[in-house]
């Protein structure tokens, strides 16, 4: 209702609701007053099936009582709860407020669980099996739909278990990625390169950087054109975490592998977004998620110490 620019529809709904309640009262009153002409034997004179007569009895009192009760209830309900147009009701109840109160209650109940990990660093938490277990459950509920239940990602969604990072794999960078979200914007770059043939040449040069199968004549021709790309991807395609520009000199492909995939991304560009979790998850939850993710991409640190080495 708050989306409308005037109160018209709000008032319309409120008046329609009140009129229909009033209609019920009138109906009850009128039918109680009106006498249907009846014969001396209290029948209406209608006869069916030869001998089935319609009596003219008043409504049973319990039935009338229920009718009155529903009218009283609906007036009371509309006074207390939202229902009359945009009138919020005397209790100002809303499903959103109730949900938020539930979340706040659950967060408070879980506080002692998370408090144990406050003094630990992200690396230390990654070595704590229980912290990892909590991190894993949080991951399954909040992240697996995009990054996969094994966190290995899929096309367009980065693998979080390897050492190849778009935005940086240091613990504080991972926290930042989760808290604030990330965007990766590759602009359509064909115009910077030249003709469709030049685009194909650059694509082959990109493939040559990681030793993928490529056409070496085309790669040689494309090398100089890569200068436009190096602004973001670095000279030789080493990547740039500050821009979220991926390394192009490894065999890890976020958006598909091969000449066709690279030509497509040069022509069309790409816009990827990791949604910010700030406000959805608490700081303590984000910390355990970051330590779970960091631990997966640094398996030697977690396995070495979980066997007892300090
Ligand atoms: C709606 C899909 C989606 C969800 C849900 C999601 N992510 Fe992401 N995430 C992405 C995408 C897409 C990227 C890559 C952004 C880019 O291309 O720069 C990303 C990037 C990241 C990165 C940075 C990776 C790098 O290489 O630097 C981390 C860390 C991360 N996500 C962790 C998480 C965690 C933890 C959760 C759960 C709280 C989560 N993500 C939930 C889509 C998602
Ligand atoms: C303005 C910065 C910018 C420029 C210029 C740019 N890129 Fe990108 N490129 C990106 C970003 C950021 C991504 C990651 C997109 C994402 O997060 O989904 C990307 C992704 C890619 C990918 C996909 C990598 C993968 O792992 O799948 C390829 C290939 C690529 N760029 C090639 C090029 C080539 C070739 C050029 C030059 C013609 C170029 N880029 C120019 C920023 C840039």
Image: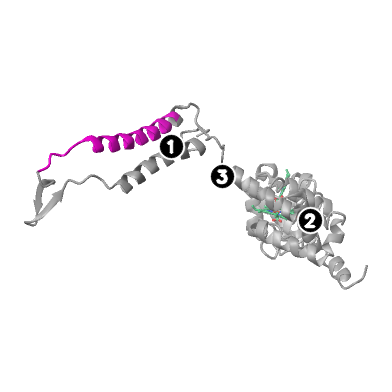
The nearer-to-camera label among 2 and 1 is 1
Q: Of the numbered discs in the image, which one, if any, rests on residue 95?
A: 3
Residue 49 appearing in the image: yes
Q: Is residue 110 left or right of residue 90?
A: right
Mark 1 CB in 8 Å range of ligand 1? no
Mark 1 to mark 3 CA distance (whole Å): 21 Å
| Residue visible at 50% across and 33% down in the picture | 86
Query: Whole-percent x and y of residue 16?
Result: 38, 33
- Mark 3 sits near ligand 1, with its Cβ under 8 Å away: no
Helix, strand or loop at label 1? It is helix
- Sequence-first disc among 1 and 3: 1
Kindly tell me whether residue 257 is visible in this rendering. Answer: no
Q: Label 3 near label 1: C-beta < 8 Å?
A: no
**Residue bearing the label numbered 1:** 75
Which stretch did the figure color magenta?
11-39
Query: Where residue 39 sits in the image (x, y, percent)?
Result: 9, 43
Q: Earlier in the sequence, mark 2 or mark 3?
A: 3
Q: Which residue is mark 2?
A: 112
Circle 1 or circle 3, nearest the eye? 1
Residue 60 as seen in the image, left or right of residue 176: left
């Amino acid at each position: 209702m708050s989306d409308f620019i005037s109160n018209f529809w709000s008032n319309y709904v409120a008046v329609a609701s009140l009129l229909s309640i009033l209609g019920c009262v009138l109906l009850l009153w009128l039918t109680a007053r009106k006498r249907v002409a009846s014969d001396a034997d209290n029948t209406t004179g209608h006869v069916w099936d030869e001998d089935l007569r319609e009596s003219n009895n008043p409504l049973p009192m319990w039935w009338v009582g229920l009718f009155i009760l529903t009218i009283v209830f609906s007036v009371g309900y509309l006074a207390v709860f939202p229902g009359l147009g945009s009138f919020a009701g005397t209790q100002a109840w809303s499903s959103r407020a109730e949900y938020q109160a539930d979340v706040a209650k659950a967060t408070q109940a879980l506080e002692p669980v998370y408090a144990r990990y406050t003094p630990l660093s992200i690396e230390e938490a990654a070595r704590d099996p229980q912290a990892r277990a909590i991190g894993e459950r949080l991951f399954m509920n909040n992240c697996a739909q995009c990054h996969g239940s094994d966190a290995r990602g899929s096309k367009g969604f980065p693998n979080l278990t390897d050492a190849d990072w778009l935005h940086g794999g240091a613990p504080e960078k991972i926290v930042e990625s989760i808290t604030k979200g990330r965007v990766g914007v590759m602009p359509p770059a064909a115009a910077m390169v030249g003709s469709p043939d030049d685009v194909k040449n650059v694509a082959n040069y990109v493939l040559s950087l990681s030793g993928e199968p490529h056409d070496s004549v085309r790669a040689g021709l494309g090398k100089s054109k890569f200068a436009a790309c190096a602004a973001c991807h670095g000279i030789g395609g080493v990547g740039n975490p500050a821009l979220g520009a991926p390394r192009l000199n490894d065999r890890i492909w976020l958006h598909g592998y091969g000449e066709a995939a690279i030509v497509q991304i040069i022509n069309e560009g790409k816009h990827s977004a990791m949604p910010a979790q700030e406000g959805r998850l608490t700081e303590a939850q984000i910390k355990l998620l970051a330590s779970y993710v960091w631990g997966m991409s640094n398996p030697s640190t977690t396995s070495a110490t979980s066997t007892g080495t300090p």
